[in-house]
Amino acid sequence: MTTFTKRTRSPFRYDIVGSYLRPEELKAARAKFAEGKITQAELKDVEDKFIIELIKKQEEVGLKAVTDGEFRRSWWHLDFFWGLNGVEKVNDGGYQFHGEYTRAETARLSGPVSGENHPFVEDFKFVRDHVSEGIEAKQTFPAPAQLLAELYRPENIEATQAVYSSEEALVEDVAKAYQQVIRDLYDAGARTIQLDDCTWGMIVSENPEGVSTKSQLNSDNKEEREKAETRRKLKELYITANNKALEGAPEDLVINTHVCRGNYHSTWATEGGYNEVAQPLFDRGNYDAYFLEYDTDRAGGFEPLEHVSDDKYVVLGLVTSKDGELEDRETLIERIHEAAEFVPLERLCLSPQCGFASTEEGNILTEEQQWDKIRLVQSVAEEVWG
C-alpha cells in the first residue's frame, strides 16, 4: 500500500480556495453602511463577529489553512486594488458573465501605484490573532496580472496611459507595490499567500478582450494571426508581471495561485482548457502550488498538467462551488487518479473549484450545502491519501 507524505504546510490534501457565503446579517450591515445608517466601526464589529465564527467553523471541519472568508470585501479582486495607493474606485464598467452582468464597478489609476499601508495587512492580523495553534491563516488577493488586465480595460486605459508612458514602467511599479504588500504581510506573520488569477482563463476563452483562442500563428488569415500574436504577448506580460512581483519573497513563504474562469452568483465568464496557457503558467510561474478549476468540461482535460514543474503541487478543484448538489465520491476518486497520469498522486490535493462567494452576492446554495461540500472534499481526500 502506497504511503503519502502528510502535508504540514499549504497546500493540504483537502483545502479551500478562500471565500465563503456571507451571513444575511453581515449583508444587511454592509447595506446599512453603504446607505450611511451605521458607522465604519459598527460595520467592523459585525464583520469581526462573523469572521471569528467562520474561523471556528473552518477549524471544526478539519481545515488546516483558513481565511476570513473575504467577509470584509465586496469583490474578490477590486477591494485589494482599491487598497493600493494610486488606485481609485469608480462606478463604471462591470463584467459580462454567462447570462448575467455584474455591478458596474472598476479600479482606475489616479496616480503612481504603490503598496504602503495596505488595509489587507490589518485584515490578516485579525485572522492571525484568532486561529488556533497549528492552523495557518491564509491570505488571498488578486494576482498582479489581474490588476494589469483591469487597468487595460477600455474604460480605464486612458487613465492608465496618463500616469504611465510605458508598459514597462507600469509593470515595474505594480511589482514593487505587490512586493511591499507581501513584505508587510510576512512581517505580520503570514506564511501562506494565494494569488487569485482569472487572466489565464480570459486568454483561453473564445474572446478575451477580442482575442481568439483558436487562432494559430501560422494561420493564413491575417486577423487570426494578429489575434494569436496578441495572446502570445499577453501570456508573456502576465507571467513576467506575476514573477517580478514575487522576486525577493522570503524562502519560507508559501506562494500559491488559483486559476478559474469567473465565479459570480453561480455563473461563469469564460471557458477553455489549460493547454493554451500551460506554458508559461505551469512551467515558469514561481508558485508552490496551483489551485485549478476542474469541475466541468469548460476546464478541459488533465493533459496540460504534464507541464507542471516537478517541484510544484496541483490542487484539483473537482467539487463545484456553484451549486449545492454533492458530487459522486467514486467519480471524484476516478478523476483524481486520471489526473495522476500527468502529475504524481503525491503532488496532488483536492479542493472546491473556487470560492463560494467571490463577490458578496455569493453563489446559489445554502451555507449548510457549502459545509457539506467541504466535508466531501475532506472525506474523499482522506480515502485517497490517508
Image: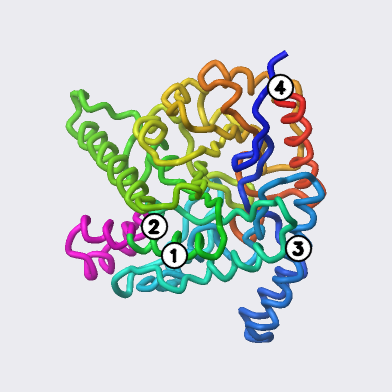
The amino acid at mark 1 is Phe
Between the residue at mark 1 and the residue at mark 4, the CA separation in whole angstroms equals 39 Å
Q: Earlier along the polypeptide chain: callout 1 or callout 2?
A: 1
Which residue has dot 1 on it?
81
The part of the chain drawn in magenta is 148-175
The residue lying toward the viewer, choosing from 368 and 288, is 288
Which residue has dot 3 on it?
23
The secondary structure that most of the magenta stretch takes on is helix
Between the residue at mark 3 and the residue at mark 2, the CA separation in whole angstroms equals 28 Å
Q: Which mark is residue 331?
A: 4
Q: For mark 1, does the 10 Å Cα neighbourhood hold few (<14), some (14 to 19), or many (20 or more) residues? A: many
- Residue shown at the point (66%, 41%) measured from the top left: 15
Helix or strand or loop: what does disc 1 sit on?
helix
Q: Earlier along the polypeptide chain: callout 4 or callout 3?
A: 3
Q: Position of residue 360 (x, y in %)?
A: 63, 61
Which residue has dot 2 on it?
147
Q: Does 339 sit above or below residue 251?
A: above
The amino acid at mark 4 is Thr
Between the residue at mark 4 and the residue at mark 3, the CA separation in whole angstroms equals 32 Å
Determine if the magenta segment contains residue 249: no
The amino acid at mark 3 is Pro
Determine if the magenta segment contains residue 174: yes
Is the C-beta separation of discs 4 and 3 under 8 Å?
no
**Which quadrant of the structure image shows residue 232?**
top left
Is the C-beta separation of discs 1 and 2 under 8 Å?
yes
Q: Nearer the viewer, mark 1 or mark 3?
A: 1
